[in-house]
Amino acid sequence: MRRTLKIGSDVPPIFLAPMAGYTDFAYRKICFELGLSFAVTEMVSAKALSYGDEKTESISKSESRTGIQLFGHDISALQIAVEKLNERNDFLWYDLNFGCPAPKIVKNHDGSSLLNDLPMLRQVIECVKKYSNKPVSAKMRLGFKDGDDYLEIAKTIEDSGADFLTVHGRTRDMFYTGEADWDAIYEIRNTVSIPVIGNGDIKNADMARWLLESGDIDGIAIGRAAIGNPFLFAELSGTEYSSKYDVIKRHFEYMCEIKNERVAVNDFKKHLIKYLNNRPEAKKIRQELQNITNIEIMHEWIKSLFYFDKI
């Protein structure tokens, strides 16, 4: 039987997993319009937030059914960041990152590095739980390296007060290679009593439905399969949309609302390549996109590539 999430049970437990450089406010907004239930922001530094860094604060721009994902191990910075964020009402919960495998994050003893330091991991969760006025979740991997006790990690997260847990079915050393170990995710789910969200290699709507209907997991988080394919959430939710072109155009317009012209145009290029979905001409188009420098030309490209694509 599926366990109930404290952040809401009136929608299917389908999450957009955070991916730096892709799942910003504009993309999350498009996914919500197409039927997504919950999203998590890109990783936000608790230390930078505590200093009042404007760029970091812009990353945390949120919507009502979103969690703000914090990383860091400086307890005083976490307290300050949470107390600042508590004043906002545009997000549902805090998500603590113990899964990021990036070397620069690990080097600073953040992200998945804390899987090797359970006392510190516990302090981080207990701090945020103490000062938060919202539910708190955690994101973990199956240890730092093969053979690590991921059940102990999960139990530590639960014992520290987390309200639910998202598990990516790889170790830190795997990064995104190999296959996600869903047997291990199920093992964690059967060991703890809090809801467990499974993440890793959910490649299409059929697999997502199967996982949800199995009853062996409390929710799913879709990452790489959703990039360039927000339509996946429409397929899962039954949400109708007028055309692929209209969605992509609107995505770019949302990006222009939150970023200046140069940044919006440059950032959207990588999304455009993903939207091409392995078309034969994608490599040639990628080269030509480098010459786009303004909003008007980007709109022309979007129209030329997708106007007649009604899928």
Image (tube, rainbow, N blue to C red):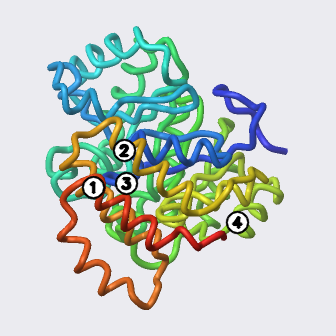
Residue type, label 1: Asp
Under circle 2, the secondary element is helix
Q: Tell me the number on the disc at residue 205.
A: 4
Q: Tell me the number on the disc at residue 255.
A: 2
Q: CA distance from mark 2 to mark 3?
A: 11 Å
Q: Residues within 10 Å of mark 2 (few under 14, many from 20)?
A: many
Q: Can you identify the residue that label 1 sits on? A: 267
Locate residue 302, reporting x and y percent: 42, 65
Q: Residues within 10 Å of mark 1 (few under 14, many from 20)?
A: some
Q: CA distance from mark 2 to mark 1?
A: 9 Å
Q: Name the N-terminal-most of marks 2 and 1.
A: 2
Q: Can you identify the residue that label 3 sits on? A: 22
Under circle 1, the secondary element is helix
Residue type, label 3: Tyr
Camera-side residue: 226 or 189?
A: 226
Locate residue 215, reporting x and y percent: 81, 53
Q: Residue at x 55, y 34 (%)?
A: 158
Q: Residue at x 44, y 55 (%)?
A: 141
**Label tally:** 4
